[in-house]
Image (cartoon, grey):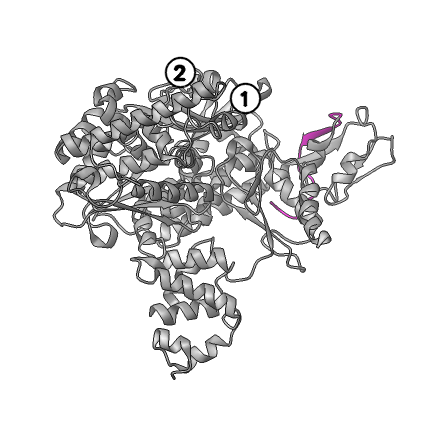
Amino acid sequence: MTKITSLNQLINLQEQIIEKKRDDITSHPGKSWGSEKFAPQALKEDQELDAPRGKEIRVVLRNCTLIDPENLDDYISEDGYQALAMVLEQYTPEQVIETIALSGLRGRGGAGFPTAKKWELTRNNPGTQKFIICNADEGDPGAFMNRRVLEGDPHSVLEGMAVAAYAIGAQQGYVYCRAEYPIAVRTLIKAIQQAQDYGILGNNIFGSDFSFNIELRMGAGAFVCGEETALIASVEGKRGEPRPRPPFPAVSGLWGKPTSINNVETFANIPQIILTGPEWFASMGTEKSKGTKTFALAGDVNHTGLIEVPLGISLREIVYDVGEGIKKNKGLKAIQTGGPMGGCIPASMIDLRVDYESLTAAGSMMGSGGMIVMDEDTCMVDIARFFMEFNQEESCGKCTPCRVGTYSMLQILNRICQGEGVEGDIEELERLSKVTKVHSLCGLGQGAPNPVISTIKHFRDEYEAHIFEKRCPAKVCRALIRYEIIKDNCTGCTFCAKNCPVGAITGERRKPHEIDQEICIQCGICFQTCNFNAIEILPGKVQLVGEHS
Amino acid sequence: MEDQSSEQTYGLITPSFHLLLKEFPLNQPESREIIDEILHSFRDVPGGLMVILNEIQSKIGYISQPIQEYISLILNIPVSTITGVVSFYSFFTTKPRGDHTIKFCMGTACYVGGTPQLMRKAEQILDIQTGDTTPDNHITMEVCRCVGSCSQAPVVVVDEQLYGRVRPSKVPPLIRDIMKTYEDS
């Protein structure tokens, strides 16, 4: 394969590819633009990414589903790698950083540190060997934007990394991808290989004296490895434990060398900023948060999936315009953003603008962009317990506040959910939250109490109902509810009895059935499987036999 | 010394090395070959331990104590370091797993969408606890972290195939499909 050695050659190649596609279309009418084997079928079956709705603008996701991710030609036909070629021919590294600074791009991994500043710090640190790392360890439950970008448009990330490497003076890059994404890993390996074949990665890229290589590293299922110092340790082949900062990775990162770590989405933005200009990018968003952000909209909205909206959009617009409202017309209770270390924003704050500062002020955070919409049937104590369970399990155990703090909080939350809460539990939770937040080593521990803090702040009454009245208002906590059969509705189809895992339901065919509360474990399978709405959930504790959740 | 090919390759003549080679799975020529090849290709990669462990986990299926000791001798890294890394990451297992794995996603959307009910149903059918393998070594049942398909919650992953919007009534057919492959053969 011939290697591309200049911007002009790349543009010529693009014209050839487009010409060829046009020929294909005229000679085979009915074929679509892009790869015919990929695009139409994928669009038809895609449950994650629909046509844009509401105020959506696609920047990061612009190529997803429209091009074949395994074909570099497709990417080149969409102006691919032109930003890199342009940068190498016309820009000095300082100019690249200046351009990104003008655009106002901030890190999309959650904390929102200005990207240009990070690059500048890394660039200005002495040393000839520097590294660039792409953080694709997207571990937040409920977030899958990065996976989609890696699977749908891997070259945009590689191009962004190459531009960043040129800006900071790195020769080697790593993509750290989590092992839960096998397709993303396969696509990336293929993409890196193709780019090397074209001479876009390797030595003397586009005829310049800039050389850059990318290697893929896989995680192995540790959430904490998304934290930058833990990620570095993992790439080095060690236990993925964070270390105190400073020194920041920009000073002493991978193998003690200056390293810049950016998120997948940050890199995917770079080529567009270079090509279209920083002014265009800065025209979107709010004063301090520019551009667009992808969110994985999940939970109880009608239209779940990936969305990309300009920053500064209100939550109302996201839930009701883009998400098309709550399922079954139920009421909105809360929106959870920022993953397990984020917080719950109550329905009363639905007009909140989505940007880094407002979300933090509301007690949540941007995070990498999971957005879970919860309707009125969600128990906030249970949600807090769920996130605490996640954080406790993923706590690496290196520092005591996080290791012990998350465990103690989980114990209290478990107790409350089982109807064994006592007076003073809420205050104890607040105290532990504070300690863990202030004293933990890394973002995981510092963020771990957020779900508890925000749910206590906005839904204190639910905690109180659990503790003092032994009642779960949303009828979720298993120890505080019981299932009963509505005799008038039950047709005696025996379906529930067949599905009951503990055999608590008895009754003759065609006669109303009955649930033995002694045996019932409140799993809810009968409620879900009943076709006649004959099973109701009643508040009130029953004698628990069986396991505790 | 000359007749032992492994010693020629690595120049190791410790008694423990001989004993180690008698242990399963290192006494199986096929497994040994796979492990040797992985070690050869990645031993010089900077920070290659993670890469090696990932490869062994995916090709052998587990990283047992003898394998860890073997890696330790060849890479000249203390076993404690390797065990430290293996025990840190949830993807690495030290015990052999069943031929098929059913993973239940415990991401937020799936949890809210009813993964616990699905697990209870599967536990009931397979008669094992989550995290265990059936006695015939056919199916391993485990919980996994968010697989990133939240719009299809709740999600069950059988081997690498993903099933979305699974209802409790869909679990028995799913398991039956796996068992069918054994009946045929």
Nearer to the camera, B106 or A26: A26
Q: Which residue is mark 1?
A: A302
A219 on left or right of A130: right
A326 on left or right of A312: right
Q: Position of residue A7 (x, y in %)?
A: 21, 30
Disc 2: host chain: A
In this rendering, the count of numbered labels is: 2
Q: Is residue B10 above or below residue A33?
A: below
Q: CA distance from mark 1 to mark 2?
A: 17 Å
The image quadrant of residue B157 is top right
Could you tell me the amino acid type at mark 2? Lys
**A510 part of magenta stretch:** no
B167 on left or right of A508: left
Nearer to the camera, A93 or B69: A93
The part of the chain drawn in magenta is A532-549
Q: Position of residue A130 (x, y in %)?
A: 19, 47
Quadrant where the image shows the N terminus of chain A: top left
A28 on left or right of A359: right
Could you tell me the amino acid type at mark 1? Asn
Q: Are marks 1 and 2 in contact (CB under 8 Å)?
A: no
The image quadrant of residue B47 is bottom left
- Numbered tag placed on residue A1 in the rendering: none
Q: Residue at x 46, y 76 (%)?
A: B20
Which secondary structure dominates the residues rendered in magenta? Answer: loop
Q: Which residue is mark 2?
A: A55
Q: Residue at x 25, y 34 (%)?
A: A113
For this orientation, the residue located farthest to the front is: A27
Q: Residues within 10 Å of mark 2 (few under 14, many from 20)?
A: some
